[in-house]
Image (cartoon, rainbow, N blue to C red):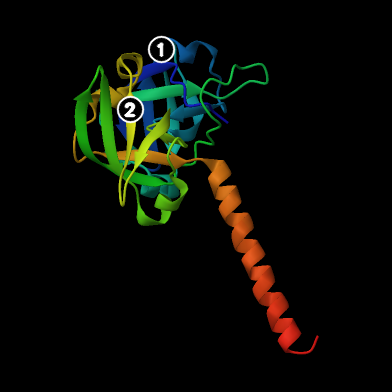
Amino acid sequence: MFTGIVEEIGEISKVNYSPVFELTISSKKVVKTLNISDSICVNGACLTVVKKQKESFSVQVIPQTLKKTNLERLNPGDKVNLERALLPTSFLGGHFITGDIDGLAILKDVREERGQRVLTLKAPFELQKYIVNQGRVAIEGVSLTVAKVEDETFSVCLIPYTLNNTTLRFCKEGDLLNLEVDILAKYVDQILKFREKEKITLKFLQQAGY
């Protein structure tokens, strides 16, 4: 579990494609306390540390994760957001993030507005219902508040601190960004679906004379 508060911007130093997709990431801060088998959030995706060096570590990515994320597009020299897994004593500054990316959002517009940068994105259709005004989303592993929801897009606002301490400052129109919607919204949706199924089943049984 993570919070979406980025601890460090790491850099991809090596990419191996075979026999398994593996990223080696240079780090100065988070690597100090990482151990092999630890979970680490890389651009919003929860991955497992499989190797560790003095100033770098390696993670492996399964095909299912590659399909849902932009990790396969990373190249040596690219920057990535890093966050270590929560401890029981950790301060929860963002919101609960699982590190299971739901899909890729398209960055439709970037503009400067009153000292902040506003990103307008389009989420996959099946995820749009989970995004609400003043709700929470994680973009590239960064916990953000939804500022505005329109028909097919939503906007988030980035203060200078967020820009300076995350990779979101490098994003440009047309980029595909890792998106995780609020897990609470998904739970509510699942409960409502289950209740609807119960009603349909009960109605069927009543009509059948049970």
Residue nearest the observer in this picture, 147 or 142: 147
Q: Disc 2 residue type?
A: Cys
Answer left or right for 132 relative to 117: right
Which secondary structure lies at badge 1? loop
Quarter residue 183 falls in: top right
Badge 1 density bin: few <14, some 14–19, many ≥20, Cα 10 Å:
few
Q: Could you say where residue 81 lies in the image, as x and y percent from the top left? A: 38, 24
Q: Quadrant of the N terminus?
A: top right
Q: Disc 1 residue type?
A: Glu
Q: Could you say where residue 69 lies in the image, as x and y percent from the top left? A: 37, 43
Gap between marks 1 and 2 measured at Cα:
33 Å
Residue 157 marker: 2
For label 1, the residue is: 55
- First of labels 1, 2 by sequence position: 1
Q: Quadrant of the C terminus?
A: bottom right
Q: Could you say where residue 43 lies in the image, as x and y percent from the top left? A: 39, 31
Which residue is pictured at 74% across the width and 82% down the height?
A: 205
Question: Mark 1 and 2 residues: CB-CB less than 8 Å, in contact?
Answer: no
Which secondary structure lies at badge 2? strand
